[in-house]
Image: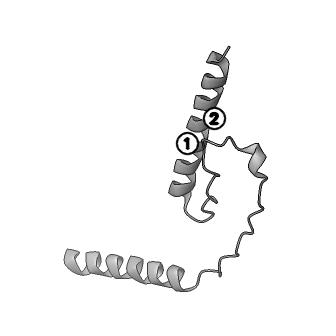
Amino acid sequence: MRTFLALLIAGGLGALFYYQKHHEAVPVAVETTATPAASHPSSEPPPRPVSEHNWMKRSLDRATDVRNQARTQTQQSQNP
């Protein structure tokens, strides 16, 4: 009886997952605006567009941006 109940719950969760994956709204394309090249230092590449639907990637991209800003500020403050 326990096995049947476990399989029933697993099947229900699988069906719910399948339903959500195949009935999602179509993602809207995000238009990126070009920033002038003068606003970025020549040593850094221009930033990549941030993933809208992947929250883990977005978090990592934000952490990278903050790290790069801190490095830039530190370098600028140490220059005479």
Q: Position of residue 41 (x, y in %)?
A: 68, 40
The residue sitting at 71% across, 44% down in the picture is 40
Q: Is residue 25 placed above or below 31 in the rendered structure?
A: below
Percent position of residue 57, x then y = 52, 56
Q: Residue at x 77, y 54 (%)?
A: 35
Assign the C terminus to one quadrant of the image. top right
* Quadrant in which the N terminus is drawn: bottom left
Please provide percent x and percent y for residue 21.
51, 80
Question: Please, is residue 51 above or below residue 3 in the view?
Answer: above
Q: Which residue sits at x=39%, y=80%?
A: 14
Label 1 CA crowd tier, 10 Å (few <14, some 14–19, many 20+): few
**Quick one: SS at disc 1?**
helix
Query: Which sits in the foreground, 45 or 68?
Result: 45
In the picture, measured across the screen, residue 5 lies left or right of residue 51, that is left
Q: Spatial distance from mark 1 to mark 2, Cα to Cα?
A: 10 Å
**Tag 1: amino acid:** Ala
- Count of numbered circles on the image: 2
The circle on residue 40 is: none
Mark 1 sits on what residue? Answer: 63
Numbered badge on residue 69: 2
Q: Position of residue 5 (x, y in %)?
A: 28, 77
| Residue at screen point 60% across, 62% down | 51
Left/right of residue 46 with respect to residue 60 in the rendered view: right
Labels 1 and 2: the sequence-earlier one? 1
Which residue in the rendered view is the most extreme toward the top? 80
Q: Nearer the viewer, residue 38 or 51?
A: 38
